[in-house]
Amino acid sequence: MTTNKETILETSGLTKKLGGKPVVKDVNLRIGRGDIYGFLGPNGAGKTTTIRMLLGLAKPTRGSIRIFGKDISKDRLAILRSVGSLVEYPSYYGHLNAIENLEAVRRLLTVPKNRIDEVLSVVRLTKDAKRPVKGYSLGMKQRLGIATALLGNPELLVLDEPTNGLDPAGILEIRELIKSLPKSHGVTILISSHLLSEIEQMATRVGIIAKGSLIYEDRIEKLRERSQGHIHLGVSEPEEAWKLLSASGVKASLVEGKLTVAEKNNAAIAAIVARLVGERHQVYRVEEEKVSLESIFLDMTGVEGSL
Amino acid sequence: MMLRIMSVEFLKLRRKLVWLLVLLGPLGVVALQAVNFGLRYDYLTKQYADDLWGGLIDNVSMLMLPTLFIGLTILASMTAGIDHQMNTWKQTLALPVNRASIFAGKFAVTAILLLCSSTLLVPFTLLLGFLLDFGFEELPLADLAMTVYYPFLAIMPFIALQVWLSVAMHNQALPLTVGIIGMIAGMFASQFPDWMPWKWPSLINDRDMPLYSVGAGLTLGLIVMLLGMCQFVRKDVR
């Protein structure tokens, strides 16, 4: 359970106003060691603004941020020493090659030179390391961005939309890379995205932000439980069938001629079907309807939040 | 820390042709004077007969001032532009480096590039003097050094201002415009009152003390640099 883990990052009442308008409102995040924390929200919900504040790039209007138990407004440099980041679109010097790009960051981090080769091989860019970065594909630039973030052996990795604009193969590649990091390097990861499908395959915990407020924060399994489906029964006389099932203590509902039962386990469904058939109902279909995580997500964030 | 930041700044300038620019400035000034003296050799050597080297240095200095103004504008814009181009500010500023040093680094790099450019003017001018057959006996090294380095020091407020503007704004059109206006103002500076900073690089003042201009330049330069630094440290990075 995450609650027993050491807290790596904690914000309380984090608020940012831009031009008088609150972009981030009272956000309380909590990330434990070893988590892959999926930070979800539609575009413009305040994800990037929150992340900028976590990295000390922007100052909160109100609220506090503690990372590794230190306050960012006091110990910014000490915290940043152990944080690697990739904020929206990769930052790179196009006229320099990958090694020079990493060297520019390495000199400021003062880590040994061989880290450059190490991170290049982690993101598999060793072969292209001597080409100017402006000739890279978006996926390669994104991987270079992750390599840069890994350069200082960070304890916390903050990745803002790292799969933005990538093709499916690129997304898969980045996802596998990110999933492997906590295992192989023991880092904690905060990763933001506007696509739930992308996060759900790697995150252990999720936080959902909409219109600047954090509206959900829990383990991914909790979110999955919500997506458990229902069984629909297609029968000849739904009304009769519903009465029969209700009378025999099965929780069932009838909406617009559609019979739905709450039971999910195989034996129970088999018993219900046997019962209906025994009473000479004709059973046409037994279907499972799953509520997708996406639609739960949409319900929470509101469709007008535009995805 | 400062040294590391500067080494990174110079690393980022690789393949940006910035050194070519550093070379072209003084080369252009001396080349134009070569044309000037080449075409009017007899007239000018008669006019400066008692001090040939002094005449050459005066002419070089006249062209050097506008070149300094425009050169520092372009150099400041280039050193800042590298980080604006792909918005690498957010990457750099999320590193464990203090912001004031990053700003100081940009200022120092711009000043050093301009200093290299100014320094090149010394051998180039001497070479032209030799080619014009002005003689080896009394090399005017002290004069030349003063002509080159005093204006460099007196122009500090403008280096600081251009670095500030170029770093603060993503769009370099405004900083470049301000720089060009500065250059034009600098050309008429001899008619300005003494308190106008545009006049200081010309080293002309009522007291006839070039060092006053240098002192004023260094002081205001430091003030403008600190103001820019304060603003840079406070602002949110986009």
Image (cartoon, grey):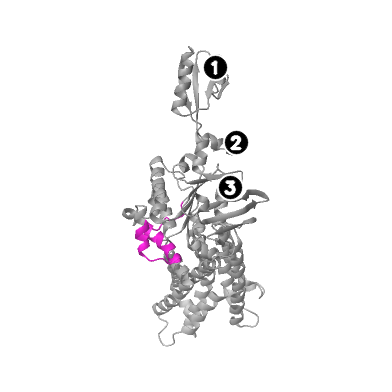
Q: Residue at x 48, y 77 (%)?
A: B43
Residue B45, x across and y down, in percent: 47, 80
Residue B14 makes an appearance in the image: no
- From the image, state whether disc 2 or disc 1 is nearer to you: 1
x then y, percent, for residue A78: 52, 65
Q: Are marks 3 and 1 on the same chain?
A: yes
Q: CA distance from mark 3 to mark 1?
A: 51 Å
- Residue A280, labelled with which disc? none
Residue designated by label 3: A46
Mark 3, residues whose alpha carbon is within 10 Å: few (<14), some, or many (≥20)?
Answer: many
Q: Position of residue A59 (x, y in %)?
A: 61, 58
The residue type indicated by label 3 comes to: Gly
Label 2 vs label 3: CA separation?
15 Å
- Badge 2 and badge 3 both on one subunit: yes
Of the residues shown, which amino acid type is indicated by label 1?
Answer: Leu
| Percent of width and height locating residue B172 | 54, 57
SS label for mark 3:
loop
Q: Is residue A99 magenta?
A: yes
Q: Nearer the viewer, residue A250 or B16?
A: A250
Q: Quadrant of residue A121?
A: bottom left
| Type of amino acid under label 2 | Glu
Mark 2 sits on what residue?
A304
| Magenta-colored span | A90-119
User: Between disc 3 and disc 1, whose residue precedes?
Assistant: 3
Local SS, label 2: helix
CA separation in Å, label 2 and label 1: 42 Å
Viewport quadrant of the C terminus of chain A: top right
Q: Note whether B114 is above or below A213 in the view shown.
A: below
Residue drawn at 55 percent across, 14 percent down: A240
Quickly name the residue at label 1: A244
State which chain disc 3 sits on.
A
